[in-house]
């Protein structure tokens, strides 16, 4: 029988200890550690979500409706029956690196997609609530589910190099920033051949930033949020981190090469084409 406090606690434990989720928890912990080490995660900066629905049977998912539920201001009808692992609002990446389970929560989407059941690892004390960027995360996941995408991870970080770059007027457009990034680092052509999306400064946590972000992610694996950071999608936390890392490196090369007041030359269009031709399908 389910529904009693003891049964819920046991099931919570089963959920957090599920064997198939261990590699995901492990990758999230290392990703959080790298974000902290890069300086992209001051205080509570950054967040992530993972769609875990495919790891569970319908029977297991049905049990989640016994958990307390929260109404949500957004409505995500295509996510009903989906289960997400989401970083907690206000949590530090450096704490997630040490103990991911205590700083994340599971969300099971129910009713019309405007309610979620929340499952925490805390048996007492304040529950971990989902990131303040939940609207953006769920808007992205809804699009990924709709398009049958293999991408299940959404990662957001305050990538210092990109925040700095988007403080410069010359790079405040998708065209200008991509031209720079492609020119600074060959890996952009290999791993982000479509470049990155770009959103002019928009208030975080709003429907507006969610709408603009999914527009950008329709044709890119990462979208830069002007003067705020970057968000990436991928099939694993490791790969979502790699995307941010490659873009950050291109920006870092620009700043390093500019130190003495010279403008970096950049890879030329024929060199970029040569890279693409030499590594087709990358
Ligand atoms: P949360 O702590 O609510 O996830 O916020 C962090 C952040 O980066 C907001 O943009
Ligand atoms: Zn942020």
Image (tube, rainbow, N blue to C red):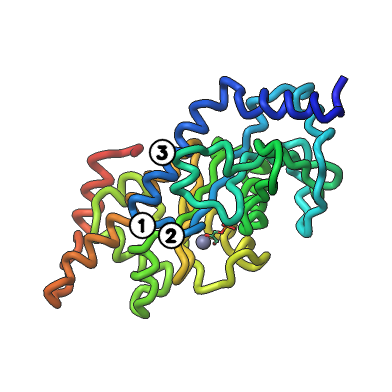
Q: CA distance from mark 2 to mark 1?
A: 6 Å
Q: Position of residue 55 (x, y in %)?
A: 63, 25
Placement of the N terminus among the 4 image quadrants: top right
Q: CA distance from mark 3 to mark 2?
A: 16 Å
The kind of secondary structure element at disc 3 is helix
Q: CA distance from mark 3 to mark 1?
A: 14 Å
In percent of the image, x 76 and y 57: which residue is there? 74
Q: Position of residue 72 (x, y in %)?
A: 78, 55
Marks 3 and 1, the one that precedes in the sequence: 3
Q: Which mark is residue 42?
A: 2
**Compared to 55, does 70 lie above or below?**
below
3 displayed left or right of 104: right
In percent of the image, x 80 and y 49: which residue is there? 70
Marks 3 and 2, the one that precedes in the sequence: 3
The kind of secondary structure element at disc 1 is loop
48 displayed left or right of 226: right
In percent of the image, x 23 and y 67: which residue is there? 255
CB of mark 3 within 8 Å of CB of mark 1? no
- Residue holding disc 1: 39
Image quadrant where residue 27 sits:
top left
Q: Callout 2: 10 Å neighbours few (<14), some, many (20+)?
A: some
Q: Callout 1: 10 Å neighbours few (<14), some, many (20+)?
A: some
Q: Position of residue 83 (x, y in %)?
A: 69, 36
In this rendering, the label closer to the viewer, 3 or 2: 2
- Residue holding disc 3: 30
Q: Callout 3: 10 Å neighbours few (<14), some, many (20+)?
A: many
């Amino acid at each position: 029988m389910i529904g009693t406090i003891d049964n819920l606690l046991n099931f919570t434990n089963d959920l957090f200890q599920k064997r198939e989720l261990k590699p995901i928890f492990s990758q999230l912990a290392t990703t959080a550690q790298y974000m902290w080490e890069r300086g992209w995660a001051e205080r509570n900066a950054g967040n992530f979500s993972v769609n875990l629905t495919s790891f569970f049977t319908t029977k297991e998912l049905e049990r989640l409706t016994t958990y307390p539920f929260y109404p949500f201001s957004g409505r995500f009808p295509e996510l009903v029956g989906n289960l997400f692992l989401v970083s907690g609002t206000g949590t530090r990446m450096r704490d997630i690196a040490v103990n991911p389970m205590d700083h994340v929560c599971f969300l099971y989407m129910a009713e019309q997609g405007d309610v979620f059941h929340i499952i925490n690892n805390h048996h007492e004390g304040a529950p971990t609530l989902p990131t303040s960027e939940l609207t953006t995360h769920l808007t992205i996941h809804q699009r990924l589910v709709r398009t049958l995408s293999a991408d299940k991870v959404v990662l957001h970080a305050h990538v210092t190099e990109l925040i700095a770059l988007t403080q410069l007027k010359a790079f405040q457009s998708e065209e200008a920033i991509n031209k720079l990034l492609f020119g600074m680092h060959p890996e952009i052509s290999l791993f982000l051949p479509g470049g990155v999306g770009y959103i002019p400064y928009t208030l975080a946590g709003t429907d507006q930033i969610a709408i603009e972000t999914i527009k950008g992610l329709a044709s890119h694996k990462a979208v830069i949020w002007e003067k705020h950071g970057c968000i990436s999608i991928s099939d694993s936390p490791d790969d979502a981190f790699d995307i941010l890392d490659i873009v950050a490196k291109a920006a870092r090369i620009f700043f390093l090469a500019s130190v003495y007041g010279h403008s970096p030359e950049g890879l030329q269009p024929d060199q970029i084409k040569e890279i693409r031709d030499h590594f087709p399908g990358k």
